[in-house]
Image (spheres, rainbow, N blue to C red):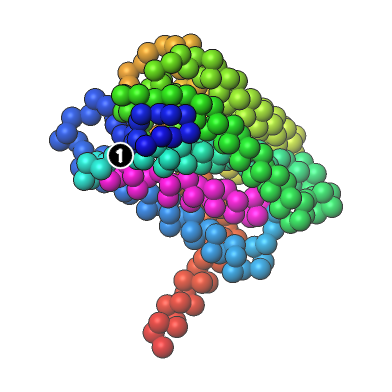
Amino acid sequence: MATLNQSEVLEFTLTGFPGLPEQFYSLVSISFFLIYNISLYANLIVVVLLLLRRHLHQPMYVIIGNLSVSDLIFDTLTLPKIIAKYWSGDGSLSYTACFIQMFFVHFLGTLDSYIVMVMAIDRYIAICKPLRYHSIMSNRLVAIICLVFWIFAAAIGLSVITSGLMLPFRGTNRVKNCFCSFNPVAVLSYVDSASSRSTRFVVAVLSHLCPLSFIVYSYIIIIQKICSSGRTENWRKAFYTCTTHWLVIGLYFIPRLAVHTYNQLQLTPNADLDVFLICLYTFVPHFTSPIIFCLRTKEIKTTFGKVFKCNISNYKY
C-alpha cells in the first residue's frame, strides 16, 4: 500500500515517556485522564455560558471563547490516544491519522499564541485607554481578528504537514512523544531531515516570539499605568491579576521555546524530560487558562451561580 511519499511505514506508535517503568503506567493514564476532564469541563462551561448569556457577549469574552474552543479541539484530538496508550497499551496511529493530528497540533498551538496576544492587547486598551475602549474594541472587530488568526494558524499547520509528508519513512516508527508533532516524527525519516527541521524552527520561533513580544509590552505598560495611579488597592489587585496571567503565559511560552531551541542546537536532553516539558506547555495551560482568564472573574462566577441555582430549582420542581 503506497502513501503520498511512497512510505513503507503504515502506522506510527506513540511511546509517551520512553523510560517510564511499567508500574507507573496507571498513574500516568489517570493523570492524563484527570487533566483531560478538567480541561474539557472548564472549557465547555466557558463556551456554553458565552453562547447562552447575551450580557457576556463582550470583546474580552469573545477572545476567551475562541481560546476555549481551540483548547477543546486540541485536547480531544490528542489526550484520548495517549490515555489509551497507558491504559490499554494502544498507542498506535495510522500514517494518515498521525499527520492529521500533527496538523491540528501545530495549527492550534500557533493559534493559542495569537489569541493570548489579542487578549493582552484587549486588557491594555481596557486599562490604559478606558474612555476609548468601546470605540476601539467591538465584538465584530474581535471576531474578524480571531478569524484571521484561525486562517493564518491553519496555513502554518498546512505548511508543517506538507514538509512532513515530503519525508520518506521506513522501518522505525516509534514517536517519542505523547502525540504526533513535526520534530519527533521527522527524526524517524531515513533521509537527513535537518533542513526541514531548521525551517520549522524558524517558523515556530517567529510564530511564538512575535505574540510574546506584544504580550510582554502590553503587560509592562499596564503595570506602569497602575503604578502611576498611586492607588495601593489597584496596585495589589493588578499585581495579583498579572501574576496569575503570567503563570499561564510563562507555562505556555518558556518551556515551548526551550524545547524548540535545544532541538535546533541538536542537544540531547533526557527523553522523558523532553516529553514532560512538551506536556507542561501543551496541556497544563489548557485547563488553567479558562479558570484564570474567565471562570474566576466576578461576572462569570455570578452568571454561573445564577445558572446553577436555576437548574437546581427546576430539578426540585
Based on the displayed image, in which of its 4 quarters is residue 278 positioned? Answer: top left
Looking at the rendering, which quadrant does residue 283 occupy? top left
**Magenta region's main secondary structure?**
helix
| Residue highlighted by disc 1 | 92
Picture layout, residue 190 above or below residue 221: above
Residue projecting furthest to the bottom: 317
Magenta region includes residue 61:
yes
Considering every residue shown, the one lying at the far front of the view is 1
Q: Nearer the viewer, residue 107 or 100?
A: 100
Residue 285 is one of the magenta-drawn residues: no
> Residue 301 location in percent, x, y?
53, 61
Q: Is residue 185 visible?
A: no
Q: Residue drawn 46% across and 37% down?
A: 99
Q: Is residue 92 above or below residue 143?
A: above
User: How many numbered marks does the figure carry?
Assistant: 1
Residue at the (55%, 59%) spot, across then down = 47
The residue shown at (53%, 58%) is: 46
Res 311 seen here: yes
- Where is residue 256 drawn, in percent x and y? 49, 27
Neighbor class of circle 1 (other Cα within 10 Å; few <14, some 14-19, many 20+) is many
Question: Which quarter of the rendered picture does the C terminus lie within?
Answer: bottom left
Q: What range of the chain is rendered magenta?
A: 60-84
Q: Name the spot of residue 6 as percent of width and height, x first.
A: 43, 29
Q: Is residue 274 left or right of residue 90?
A: right
301 or 175: nearer the eye? Answer: 175
Asked if residue 134 lies left or right of residue 317, the reply is: right
Instruction: Report the front residue among 209 and 247.
Output: 209
Question: Residue, x 71% and y 40% (percent of image)?
Answer: 121
Up-down: is 138 above or below 177? below
* Residue type of the residue flagged with mark 1: Ser
- Locate the N terminus by quadrant: top left
